[in-house]
Image: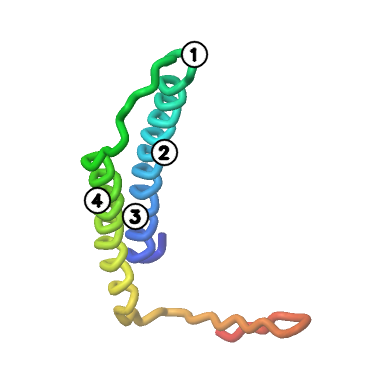
Amino acid sequence: PATPIIEGIINLHHDLIFFLILILIFVAWLLIRTLHFFNAKNNPIPSNLIHGTLIELIWTITPSFILITIAIPSFALLYSIDEVVDPAVTVKAVGHQWYWSYEY
C-alpha cells in the first residue's frame, strides 16, 4: 500500500473477511445440525415448541451489534480519506469514446 489509508482499508478488509468466514461456518453448522435433528427419520416425534422469544431476540440483536462493530472502523477510514494529502504526482485519466487521454 502506498498510503496509510489504503493500508487501513486492506486491514479492515482482511478483518471483515475473517469474521465473515467465522459467521459462514457457524451458520452452515447450524443449518446442518437443524437438517439432521429435524429429519423425520431421526426424530419421528416432532417437538411442540412454537415460540422461542429468547432465540428471536438473540438473532435479531446479534446482527445489529455485528453491523455496529463493522461501521465504527469503516466510518473512521471514511473520514480519514477526507484529509488533504499533497501528492507528488497527479494523474488525470479521461475516457473518451474511442481512446483515453492522460494529464500529469
Q: Nearer the viewer, mark 4 or mark 3?
A: 4
Gap between marks 2 and 3, in whole Å? 18 Å
On the image, the x and y values in percent for residue 45 come to: 39, 16
Mark 4 falls on what kind of element? helix
The residue under label 4 is: 61
User: Which residue is located at x 34 percent, y 66 percent?
Assistant: 5
**In front: 42, or 47?**
47
Check disc 2 and give the amino acid type. Answer: Leu
The residue under label 2 is: 24
> First in sequence: mark 2 or mark 3?
3
Q: Residues within 10 Å of mark 3 (few under 14, many from 20)?
A: some
Check disc 4 and give the amino acid type. Answer: Ile
Gap between marks 2 and 4, in whole Å? 18 Å
> First in sequence: mark 1 or mark 2?
2
Q: Are marks 1 and 2 in contact (CB under 8 Å)?
A: no
Residue 12 tag number:
3
Check disc 1 and give the amino acid type. Answer: Lys
Gap between marks 4 and 3, in whole Å? 23 Å
Q: Residues within 10 Å of mark 2 (few under 14, many from 20)?
A: few
Work out whether 65 lies above or below 45.
below
Mark 1 falls on what kind of element? loop
User: Which residue is located at x 29 percent, y 50 percent?
Assistant: 60
The residue under label 1 is: 41
Location of residue 26 by image quarter: top left
